[in-house]
Amino acid sequence: PSGSNDDDLFEGLGDLDQIEAEAAERTEKDATSADDDEFGDTFDSDSMDDEPDVLDEFDQDDETDFADLDSDEAQDLDSETIGKEAPDIPDFDMDDVFGDDEDEEEDDEEAQKAKLKKLLILAGGGVGVAVVLGGVAWWVLGGEPAAPDEQMVQQGTSSQSGTVIDLGDLVQEQPESVAPMQSSQPLDTGSAMTSPPTGAAPQQYTQSSEVADAQDAPVATGEQAELQMHGLAVQMEPGAGVVIPSGTRASFDMVAAWPKSGALQEAPFKELIQNGEHGPLPIIGEDGLTPYDAYARPEPREKSGNPKVALVITGLGMSRAATEAAITTMPPDVTMALSVYARGLDFWGKQARLTGHELLLEVPSESADFPFSDPGPNALQSLAPPEKNIEQLEWMLSRTTGYYGVLTTYGSKFLSVEEQVKAVMAAIKKRGLMYVDGGAQDSLGTRVAYNAKTNWATVEMTLDSVPGRVALDAKLLEFEEMARKRAVAVARVSATPLTLERLSVWLRSLKEKNLKLVPLSSLANKQLIR
């Protein structure tokens, strides 16, 4: 009976071997799960992302080793694993890693600053040496300052109170006979404006007492009247200074005046004028009369078989003294050319026609070596549209009246462009003017004018291209030979004391040389096209 009871007692427990095996299996699973939890806590998500290769070290063989452990070993392993702390990760000091580079950069920066200081010291020393040397050179070579002219300092004034200059005191009576080669001549510039004393309140300049007395008179006479006629007797604002022209009337005293001739008919003719955008423009009259026919000087009546020469004085109006000398000292058959950039062209044109001179108007155009040869702000441009150049031409033609033709100046580039020359020539012909080519290199002007059936002439020589008395006399001899070979010759020259003096002597010798001076307008269409 006892045996049967024991069997009944353990009958419900089942097989003990099987129970132990299941217990061992459960223990193994618990140990495995505990290790996984510990491993998961130690390696978080950031560590897993940064070191993905750590998980690869735990392969299937490691899992098999854990499975072979029994429950007791697994529990001991589990307890030991849990009790252990994670190994300490050494701290990295960024200064230890990058400190050397920063020190090197600081050293380089200090070295550069040291070099810069040395350069500044050397530069300062060089400037100091230059200043010292300059001062020594000025002291050695400069000399003593010139003493002021006693004639130009008024009595009762001092250097501290301001210097009063009266150029009128410099005007002296001219001797009746002046040597032709006399080099020094007194200035004839009129009275000068005086400046207020230092420290005085700003006020307008006042003229000398003599000029002031002349202004108080009802009618100005003498030198003051002449200054008023030309608009020069004006009061200047403080600081404007005294303007003295480079050439004065006295500079041309050596030029012998030509005998006076009859005046040309007063210009302009009303029927030959059209109001334009910028002023009066020349036109052909309803009866067919052209400005060339109306304003040109008539050809000399006496016939001669001698070679003919024509002269053009250019650049007039820019200098009062030079323009006045050219008009009054040259023979009436010499043609005058007015600059479009000058002021008072109507006045000078009237004066020229009163002395018998015919007039040309200068038309500047673009040069090949611009800006070394500058034709001016309103010159005709080779790259501008033809319409724009026609507008510029009309601006030039409206500066004054009474001229019979135009003279091209500069233009070595513009006059070589056929399209531009044709457009300008058509406008010149439309207004009944004569075209005179200034002699620019590669100019197509004369050929285009011939084809357009426009009155034309061309300048064949510039007499003062090389400055100097010897060079000018040589050019005049060359001009004579040209006239004898070609029967007609045209030259141009600017108005300077030297050129006018030499021309005056040369023109008086033409009769002995069997040469005939004629107005340029009389040589229209009589030259060869070259």
Image: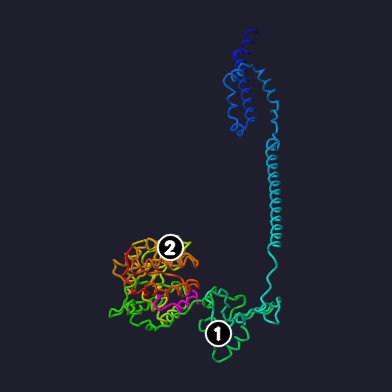
| Residue 237 magenta | no
Foreground residue, 36 or 246? 246
Identity, as a three-letter code, of the amino acid under mark 2: Ser
Q: Nearer the viewer, mark 2 or mark 1?
A: 1
Indicate left or right for 439 with 165 as reference. left
Boundaries of the magenta span = 317-335
Task: Find residue 446 and report its horizontal and vertical position in percent.
Answer: 33, 66
Question: On the image, numbered disc 1 is attached to which residue?
Answer: 223
Marks 2 and 1 sit apart, C-alpha to C-alpha, by 42 Å
Task: Find residue 51 and report its horizontal and vertical position in percent.
Answer: 60, 30
**Number of labelled discs?**
2
Indicate left or right for 447 with 115 as reference. left
Question: On the image, numbered disc 2 is attached to which residue?
Answer: 367
**Residue 376 showing in the rendered view:** no
For label 1, the crowd category at 10 Å Cα-Cα, with few meaning under 14, some 14 to 19 and many 20 or more, is some
| Residue 320 magenta | yes
Identity, as a three-letter code, of the amino acid under mark 1: Glu
Q: Report which quarter residue 275 is drawn in.
A: bottom left
| Residue at position x 65%, y 78% in the image | 152
Indicate left or right for 442 with 42 as reference. left
Residue 284 bears which disc, if any? Answer: none
Q: In the displayed structure, would residue 214 be above or below residue 122?
A: below
**Residue 57 showing in the rendered view:** yes
